[in-house]
């Protein structure tokens, strides 16, 4: 116990060359059968860079958003297809197979907000997409790739939730109904049953807009960060009611993104105070404060093997290996 | 035979005559004549003097045995046979060398002790015990020698010899033993033998028999002298043996062993007393009381009562008789020993209930006991521990007769507490003691009782609170606050509650706990309040907390639980983020601090100021006075963490950068109108800190480093030292040095920068202290600032070491001290004393002698006075330190002047 704490860790390496603030990050598991995955980053200037983690160089640059900020990147499990969401109100589907990089499809969005979309992909060719909808408080559910609108989730008028700020689609193993977790502008997190278009439960976790959330479906527990100083942990019981389990007070306000590592051991937050904070997911014990970036950290992403990438306004992407999986 | 009888008769009657003539002194005649080889030294003792008093009053009708003895000597030849036998035995003992004969003779005498198959008649036994026993014992003692004991094999002789001491009347045997130990040459065979015998005597529990004998004599103070002697011997046994035996002393006689034994013996005697009272026999415990009293006066309360009180606690629990005996025991304690005994009882009793059972209503019966319990232990001493105090006051509270005393005690305690002169003249420890006693009293007294004398109590309370809050010493103030809070709530419950802000520490917690009314505890097991249930709750709550976040999927987590011990990294860099709008120039800061309505900028400017000042001294000097003015008047408009420290550091930095002008400005402001006390004290602090900075050797070289901007903006800041250490280590390993030992850094050297400006700091502060302003009167109510001023002047003096201005400074400072030396406030006096020490340390010895001789002599006599008489402990300590410095100074000067 008396041993001094470990000195703060250093990044494993830093990727430079995005040439503008990094707003979206996503690990793409090596589709080409390479040892290390690719890292995708979306920048303020509308470019998507594909980085090889082996050579640590840009493999390809995709330009599909007309110079508008790329806010969300997601690959689909079936085939190397990439979704990118930009502030140009477009969601592009890219085909990356065999070195191609062409837009194969695109969805027009009707919301100018910052809300990132969410995807629920079964094993089939069909997948479900949630994006902010036409009305300022709506969430639209689309079935892809047919782009047919399944429904639009609109809260009751008197609820005054404000805009949706972040979305997460998921489906419990036991149930056929897809569910949607949405963080709203008023600081509450709501659970939607997509098929019945009803809010199952809503809990006010924050007093400021919810900026990011992640959900651990195995433990039925989630975490959300907002513009204020606290991180909220909430859980879902059998009656599908959300309950706040605890809050964790941070030193500085503002969380841009929250991600739980796929092995559900740790979670990382992207802070407006230039720092990335790492917590133990089960106990919420603070583990590390990564003070590397010199501008707001916009996004964090975990690879399946546990690697952590953080993207910041200082145009750098730092990659960390913390508490490696044994 | 007839010759022998004749001789014996004439001897006895001669002795009687002798005794009649010279009283006590005649005893030596008997001793010398009958025990012909008895140690003459023994005859001097009062022991021997006390004994013959029995036959000295032969015609008291109430003593049939003695009349019988008289008759025996005169006419009854049969009874005088005892005397004959004894005389013959003595003769044989003294002349014969034949072991068998001696053995027979002694054996025949043993008949008189009873306990043989053929005991002598009771009258004969009685006579032997009363008249001849001690004489005979002395004779036995006289015969003791290695050869004599060898006359019979196997130690038979010694056994027989010892049996007389161990089986005969205990009090006489004890006295003879003590007497012979006292008289024996040291070291000698006889001394050791006697000491061993005494040890055996003690181990056989004969001490109880000695005391029992005294309890059984119902006829009141029969032999005061004998009792007195016994008492001295019983209690003084360890001292006597220790003196006689020196290093040969036996463990039994060590006080720490002897007095517990004595306690047990007293208890046994008490048992006997209780038994005989049950049997309808009268007994007196006054001898026991005296033994107890004397032992306690000798400071052996712990040993004796440590044994006695726990046993009595148990014994008195169910028995009224035991209680009465116990009360009697304490009541009979002589007045001169009452205090020691009561203190011992209070200390040894585990709680007020037990104390009440053991003492009964002693305080209402004995004036002395009342004085000890209600005045001495409360006001005149302050050595009792808190459990003792609680026992004591709880005892007073337990009975309706004693409750009036408790009320009286509370009134007097509050009066003492409230007197303002007591605050100045009573040591802090005692003030705490009195305060705690008040709180305990309040916890015991009921609301109705308090209401009866509400006005009186409140008046003294408020007086005390007022004078305490005026005090300059924080502990005194805090004491006032705590007592005021608690006492006002109890005395005046309907009024608005007083609430002070004070830091919680051990003392406050202890005092607040005292104020809680104790639950009615019964029996010794509950004496110590048990906190077990409280501590037991915490783990519960913890486990609840831990299991709280996840009630459901506990089982699936078991594999995570096992290996999830992630060690956290250092998170000290995680500080609050500042916006980076801080000005980059000193003038910018000045603007931001004066005109800006942008509070973030204002705060950033304040934070950046110190670094900027050190980085650009030239720019600072242009605006130094203006900056000092702004900083001095700066108010905390937003809740800035560490505002006071930031402002102070910036002020110090300005002062260090431009000492002469800023110090001049600040010292003038110190005596100006329209400043708060806080600001004036800030000025003093800043001056001290700046002087310290200036006088620190090599401060100029270090200043830029200190002034580096907030390290929180450099993320890698904490790593640099580790990196440097690694490099230095590498260099060190690869470098060969020719001389070892001086590898450490040389101390920074440089001229004392304070030299040229010390005058600006010091003299203006001394100028106006005796001229009161409308808002500021140093010699009146603003003592706190005066104390600060004295401390500051002392510090400045100390920092001016090795400067040319030190001598006039010292002179002025000693004059200042002289003017204020009888100040009533302890804090001011402390400041003055430390100032004197600073003068002694800073002014060179030769100059002290040449220029300040008169002042020093005056100061010295004052220091001597303070060191002896000052009520404040710190003052005394400081005075002693100053005196020591003076001594050192003299030692330094004497070798210079003597050759």
Image (spheres, rainbow, N blue to C red):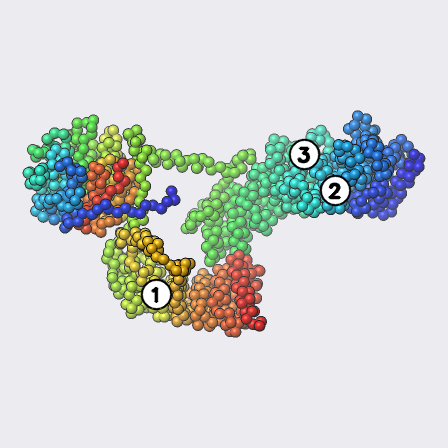
Residue under the image location 33 percent in, 62 percent down = B650
Label 3 neighbourhood size at 10 Å, few (<14), some (14-19), many (20+)? Answer: some
Q: Compared to B736, does B233 lie above or below?
A: above
Q: Earlier in the sequence, mark 2 or mark 1?
A: 2
- Quadrant in the picture for the C terminus of chain B: bottom right
Q: Are marks 1 and 3 in contact (CB under 8 Å)?
A: no
Numbered label attached to residue B700 = 1
Q: Is residue A324 visible?
A: yes
The image position of residue A53, as x and y in percent, is 17, 43
Q: Nearer the viewer, residue B595 or B457?
A: B595
Q: CA distance from mark 3 to mark 2?
A: 33 Å
Numbered label attached to residue B34 = none
Residue under the image location 10 percent in, 45 percent down = A61
Residue under the image location 12 percent in, 44 percent down = A59
Q: Earlier in the sequence, mark 3 or mark 2?
A: 2
* Residue marked by disc 2: B189
Report in which chain the residue with disc 3 lies: B
The quarter holding residue B51 reads top right
């Amino acid at each position: 116990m008396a041993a001094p704490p470990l000195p703060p860790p250093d990044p494993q390496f830093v990727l430079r060359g995005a040439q503008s603030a990094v707003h979206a990050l996503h690990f793409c598991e090596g589709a080409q059968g390479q040892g290390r995955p690719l890292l995708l980053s979306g920048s303020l200037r509308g470019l998507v860079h594909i980085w090889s983690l082996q050579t640590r160089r840009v493999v390809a640059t995709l330009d599909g958003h007309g110079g508008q900020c790329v806010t969300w990147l997601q690959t689909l499990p079936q085939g190397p297809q990439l979704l990118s969401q930009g502030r140009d109100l477009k969601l592009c589907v890219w085909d990356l197979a065999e070195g191609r990089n062409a837009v194969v499809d695109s969805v027009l969005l009707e919301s100018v907000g910052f809300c990132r979309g969410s995807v629920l992909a079964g094993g089939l060719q069909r997948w479900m997409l949630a994006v902010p909808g036409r009305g300022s408080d709506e969430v639209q559910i689309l079935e892809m790739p047919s782009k047919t609108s399944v429904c639009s989730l609109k809260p009751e008028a008197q609820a005054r939730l404000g805009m949706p700020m972040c979305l997460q689609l998921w489906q419990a193993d036991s149930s056929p109904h897809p569910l949607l977790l949405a963080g709203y502008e008023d600081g509450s997190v709501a659970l939607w049953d997509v098929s019945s278009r009803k809010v199952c439960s809503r809990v006010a976790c924050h007093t400021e807009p919810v900026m990011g959330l992640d959900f651990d479906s195995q433990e039925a527990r989630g975490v959300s960060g907002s513009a204020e100083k606290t991180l909220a942990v909430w859980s879902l019981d059998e009656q599908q009611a959300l309950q706040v389990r605890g809050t964790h007070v941070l030193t500085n306000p503002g969380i841009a993104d929250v991600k739980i590592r796929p092995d559900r051991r740790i979670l990382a937050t992207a802070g407006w105070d230039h720092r990335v904070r790492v917590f133990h997911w089960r106990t919420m014990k603070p583990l590390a404060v990564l003070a590397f970036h010199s501008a707001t950290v916009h996004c964090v992403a975990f690879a399946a093997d546990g690697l952590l990438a953080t993207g910041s306004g200082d145009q750098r992407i730092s990659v960390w290996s913390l508490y490696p999986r044994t | 035979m007839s010759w022998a009888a004749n001789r014996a008769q004439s001897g006895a009657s001669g002795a009687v005559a002798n005794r009649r003539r010279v009283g006590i002194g005649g005893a030596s005649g008997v001793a010398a004549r009958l025990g012909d080889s008895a140690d003459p030294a023994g005859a001097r003792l009062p022991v021997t003097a006390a004994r013959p008093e029995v036959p000295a009053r032969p015609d008291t009708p109430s003593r049939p045995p003695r009349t019988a003895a008289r008759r025996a000597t005169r006419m009854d030849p049969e009874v005088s046979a005892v005397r004959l036998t004894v005389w013959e035995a003595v003769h044989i003992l003294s002349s014969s060398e034949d072991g068998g004969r001696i053995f027979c003779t002694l054996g025949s005498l043993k008949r008189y002790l009873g306990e043989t198959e053929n005991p002598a008649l009771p009258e004969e036994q009685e006579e032997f015990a009363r008249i001849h026993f001690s004489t005979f014992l002395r004779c036995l003692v006289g015969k003791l020698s290695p050869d004599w004991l060898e006359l019979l094999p196997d130690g038979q002789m010694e056994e027989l010899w010892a049996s007389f001491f161990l089986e005969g009347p205990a009090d006489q045997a004890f006295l003879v033993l003590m007497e012979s130990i006292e008289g024996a040459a040291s070291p000698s065979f006889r001394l050791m033998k006697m000491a061993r015998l005494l040890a055996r005597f003690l181990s056989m529990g004969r001490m109880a028999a000695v005391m029992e004998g005294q309890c059984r004599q119902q006829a009141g103070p029969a032999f005061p002298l004998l009792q007195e002697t016994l008492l001295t011997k019983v209690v003084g046994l360890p001292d006597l043996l220790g003196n006689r035996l020196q290093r040969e002393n036996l463990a039994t006689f060590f006080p720490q062993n002897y007095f517990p034994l004595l306690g047990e013996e007293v208890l046994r005697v008490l048992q006997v007393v209780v038994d005989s009272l049950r049997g309808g026999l009268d007994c007196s415990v006054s001898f026991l009381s005296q033994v107890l009293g004397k032992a306690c006066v000798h400071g052996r309360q712990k040993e004796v009562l440590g044994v006695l009180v726990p046993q009595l606690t148990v014994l008195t629990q169910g028995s009224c008789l035991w209680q009465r005996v116990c009360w009697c025991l304490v009541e009979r304690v002589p007045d001169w020993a009452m205090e020691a005994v009561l203190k011992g009882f209070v200390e040894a009793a585990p709680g007020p209930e037990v104390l009440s059972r053991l003492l009964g209503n002693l305080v209402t019966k004995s004036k002395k006991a009342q004085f000890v319990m209600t005045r001495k232990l409360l006001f005149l001493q302050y050595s009792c521990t808190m459990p003792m105090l609680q026992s004591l006051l709880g005892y007073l509270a337990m009975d309706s007769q004693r409750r009036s005393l408790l009320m009286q005690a509370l009134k007097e305690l509050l009066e003492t507490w409230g007197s303002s002169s007591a605050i100045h003249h009573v040591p802090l420890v005692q003030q705490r003691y009195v305060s705690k006693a008040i709180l305990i009293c309040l916890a015991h007294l009921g609301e109705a009782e308090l209401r009866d004398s509400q006005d009186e109590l409140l008046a003294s309370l408020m007086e005390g609170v007022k004078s305490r809050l005026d005090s300059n010493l924080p502990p005194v103030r805090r004491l006032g606050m705590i007592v005021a809070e608690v006492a006002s709530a109890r005395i005046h419950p309907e009024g608005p509650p007083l609430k002070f802000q004070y830091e919680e520490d051990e003392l406050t917690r202890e005092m607040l706990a005292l104020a809680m009314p104790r639950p009615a505890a019964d029996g010794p097991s509950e004496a110590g309040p048990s906190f077990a249930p409280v501590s037991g709750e915490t783990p519960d709550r913890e486990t609840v907390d831990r299991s709280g976040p996840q009630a459901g999927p506990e089982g699936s987590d078991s594999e995570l639980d096992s290996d999830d011990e992630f060690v956290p990294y250092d998170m000290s860099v995680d500080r609050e983020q500042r916006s980076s709008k801080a000005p980059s120039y000193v003038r910018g800061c000045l603007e931001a601090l004066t005109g800006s309505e942008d509070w973030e900028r204002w705060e950033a400017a304040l934070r950046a100021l110190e670094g900027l000042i050190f980085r650009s001294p030239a720019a600072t000097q242009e605006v130094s006075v203006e900056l000092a003015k702004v900083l001095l008047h700066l108010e905390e408009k937003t809740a800035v963490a560490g505002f006071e420290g930031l402002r102070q550091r910036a002020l110090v930095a300005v002062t260090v950068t431009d000492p002469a002008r800023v110090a001049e400005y600040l010292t003038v402001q110190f005596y100006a109108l329209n400043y708060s006390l806080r600001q004036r004290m800030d000025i003093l602090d800043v001056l001290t800190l700046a002087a310290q900075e200036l006088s620190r050797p090599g401060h100029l070289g270090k200043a830029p480093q200190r002034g580096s901007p907030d390290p929180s903006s450099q993320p890698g800041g904490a790593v640099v030292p580790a990196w440097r250490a690694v490099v230095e280590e590498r260099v060190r390993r690869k470098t060969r040095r020719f001389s070892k030992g001086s590898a450490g850094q040389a101390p920074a050297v440089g001229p004392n920068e304070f030299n040229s400006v010390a005058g600006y700091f010091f003299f203006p502060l001394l100028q106006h202290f005796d001229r009161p302003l409308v808002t500021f009167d140093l010699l009146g109510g603003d003592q706190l600032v005066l104390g600060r001023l004295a401390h500051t002047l002392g510090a400045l003096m100390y920092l001016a070491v090795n400067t040319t201005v030190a001598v006039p400074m010292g002179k002025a400072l000693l004059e200042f001290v002289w003017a204020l030396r009888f100040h009533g406030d302890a804090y001011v006096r402390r400041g003055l004393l430390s100032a004197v020490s600073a003068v002694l340390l800073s002014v060179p010895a030769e100059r002290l002698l040449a220029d300040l001789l008169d002042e020093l002599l005056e100061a010295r006599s004052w220091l001597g006075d303070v060191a002896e008489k000052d009520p404040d402990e710190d003052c005394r300590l400081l005075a002693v330190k100053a005196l020591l410095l003076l001594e050192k100074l003299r030692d330094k000067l004497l070798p210079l002047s003597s050759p």
